[in-house]
Image (cartoon, rainbow, N blue to C red):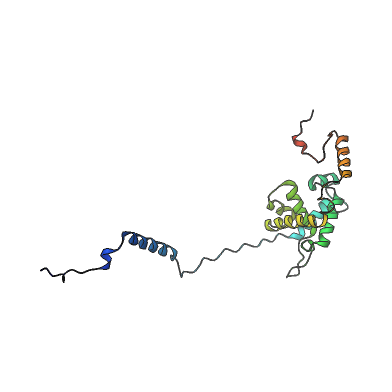
Amino acid sequence: MGSSSNHHFSIHDHRDPYDQESDQAWNQIFEQATVGYGQPRKEKKKKKYIERNREEGQERLFKDYFAEDATYPAYMFRRRFRMNKPLFEKIVDRLSTHISYFKQRPDATGRTSLTALQKCTAAIRILAYGCAADKVDEYLRLSETTALLCVEKFVDGIISLFGDDYLRRPTKDDLKRLLAVGEARGFPGMIGSIDCMHWEWK
C-alpha cells in the first residue's frame, strides 16, 4: 500500500485562476497609486505680480473722454461706448452709489482701487465689441480676471438698478412710439432695432 507521506498538499495548488488574475490586477493598481507616495509635492507656481499703474489708466481715460476738453468728441464716444455720454455717466453714478463693487476704496496699503469709470468702461467695451477680457488691459490697466468680474458686476448692477425701467415688456404706448419711429426711418412694422449690416439697401 502506497504511503501518502511524501505528497505535500498546498492550498495554492487549488486556487482559482480567476483569483490569481484578480490579485495581480489589484497589485498593479496599488503600485500605480502609491508611486511617489511620501515624496515632496511640487510647489505651485505663483502668478507673477504685474504693476499696471492703474492711476495712469484712469488719467488717460478721463482725458480722452470725460474732461471738458476731451480728446475725442461726443460722436466718437457714442460710437465706441454704444451710448451717449450723459447716459453712461448716469449709469456710472448709480452703480458707484448703490453697488459696493464700484465704490472706490483704499486697499491694505492705502492705495486707491480702480475707479468706477475704469470698471464700467471695461464692461461696456467687452459687451459692445465682444472682445477678449484681456483686450482692455493695455488701455484701462486692469487684469483679465478683474475685467471679467467687472462685466459680471456690471450686468448684475444694471438688472438691479434699472430692471424696472428698461428690462420690462413694452407697454401699448411704448409699442406705438417704437412703431412710429421705425416707420419714420423707413422700417414700417419694426419694433426693435436690427443689425443694419445684414440689410440689403436699394
Q: Residue furthest bottom?
A: 5
| Residue 103 % position (x, y) | 80, 63
- Name the residue at 82% across, 57% down: 161
Judging depth in this view, the residue of 163 and 79 nearest the camera is 163
Is residue 45 rendered to the left or right of residue 156?
Answer: left
Judging depth in this view, the residue of 86 and 113 nearest the camera is 86
In this picture, is 77 found above or below 184?
below
In this picture, is 116 found above or below 199?
below
Judging depth in this view, the residue of 38 and 55 nearest the camera is 38
Judging depth in this view, the residue of 32 and 16 nearest the camera is 16
Q: Residue furthest front?
A: 1
In this picture, is 122 found above or below 197?
below
- Name the residue at 83% across, 62% down: 97
| Residue 188: quadrant of the picture | top right
| Residue 71 % position (x, y) | 83, 49
- Name the residue at 86% across, 38% down: 179
Q: How many marks?
A: 0
- Name the residue at 78% across, 36% down: 196
In this picture, is 181 found above or below 32?
above
| Residue 147 % position (x, y) | 71, 56
Q: Residue furthest left?
A: 1
Is residue 149 rendered to the left or right of residue 1?
Answer: right
Q: Tell me the quadrant of the picture where the C terminus can be found.
A: top right
| Residue 65 % position (x, y) | 83, 51
Q: Tell me the quadrant of the picture where the N terminus can be found.
A: bottom left
